[in-house]
Amino acid sequence: MEKKELFERVIAYFQKEMPVAETELEYESPYGLLVAVILSAQCTDKRVNQITPDLLKRFPTPEKLAESDPAEVFDYIRSCSYPNNKAKHLVGMARMLVSDFAGEVPDDISDLQKLPGVGRKTANVITSVVFNKPAMAVDTHVFRVAARIGLTVNAKTPLETEKQLVEYFPEELLPLAHHWLILHGRYVCTARSPQCRKCGLADICKYYNENRLSE
């Protein structure tokens, strides 16, 4: 199957089966989502959603967080992964938002990546989710699912995966496609035990056809 046709089949499937696909992180503002995404690195959305209400009640604005210190922030986020580093990143992020961006979350990927704790994936999440810009954030789910289905070929890094996906997904679908792949990876195409038998993409999936049909 040609790559273009494969993408068309995948898009058609998700448009039918998952017409609404959104982040599972709970947030009320661009700042709140930025905090949540920084916390979500190697941590579940469920855990982050348990942490952020008290954290953001104490630090409802970048200005409030900028006035704090990592030791105080640590007490609120100790149950997530790497709380020491994330506490430092959150305070540093808030201080830069205040000093360089007038307390507003920028909508530019390059500007976002200047913030402590914000890599390309986080920047892409913010620009696509908050500002609905055509960006493809690649986390472990997107990286795995894209390779298994065959949407990407020999992509060794998240950036290589991003470039291949951006080439074939229509620009206007990129924010939605990001969530399609994440949610599919989270609940169907799981890392250790992919549920191929109940996956509606099995007939066109490279992984399934190479590893399952011969069983």
Image: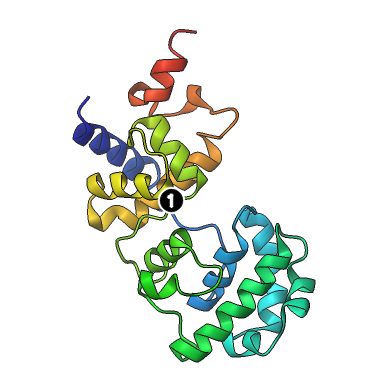
Position of residue 73 measured from the top left corner of the image (x, y, whole percent): 73, 76
**Picture residue at 50% right of the left edge, 40% below the top:** 185
Which residue is nearer to you in this view: 25 or 65?
A: 65
Left or right of 170 on screen, residue 45: right
Q: Can you say whether 67 is above or below 8 in the image? A: below
Which SS class for mark 1? loop
Residue at (51%, 45%) from the top-left corner? 140
Residue at 45% from the left image edge and 28% from the top image edge? 199
Pick the residue in front: 194 or 115. Answer: 115
User: In the drawing, does residue 79 fall left or right of residue 210?
Assistant: right
Of 164 and 178, which appears nearest the observer?
A: 164
Where is residue 92, by image quadrant?
A: bottom right
Left or right position of 66 against 164: right
Tell me which residue sits at (38%, 31%) in the image.
149
Compared to residue 55, the image places residue 189 above or below, namely above
Q: In the rendered image of this protein, does residue 42 appear above or below residue 204? A: below
User: In the rendered view of the protein, which quadrant contains the N terminus?
Assistant: top left
Q: Position of residue 103 (x, y in %)?
A: 50, 88
Report which residue position mark 1 lands on.
Answer: 138
Camera-nearest residue between 54 and 13: 54
Q: Callout 1: few (<14), some (14-19), or many (20+) C-alpha neighbours within 10 Å?
A: many
The number of callouts visible is 1
- In the image, residue 100 lies at what x, y percent? 46, 88
Q: Which amino acid does label 1 sit on?
A: Val
The picture places residue 34, in percent across and down from the top left corner, at 53, 71
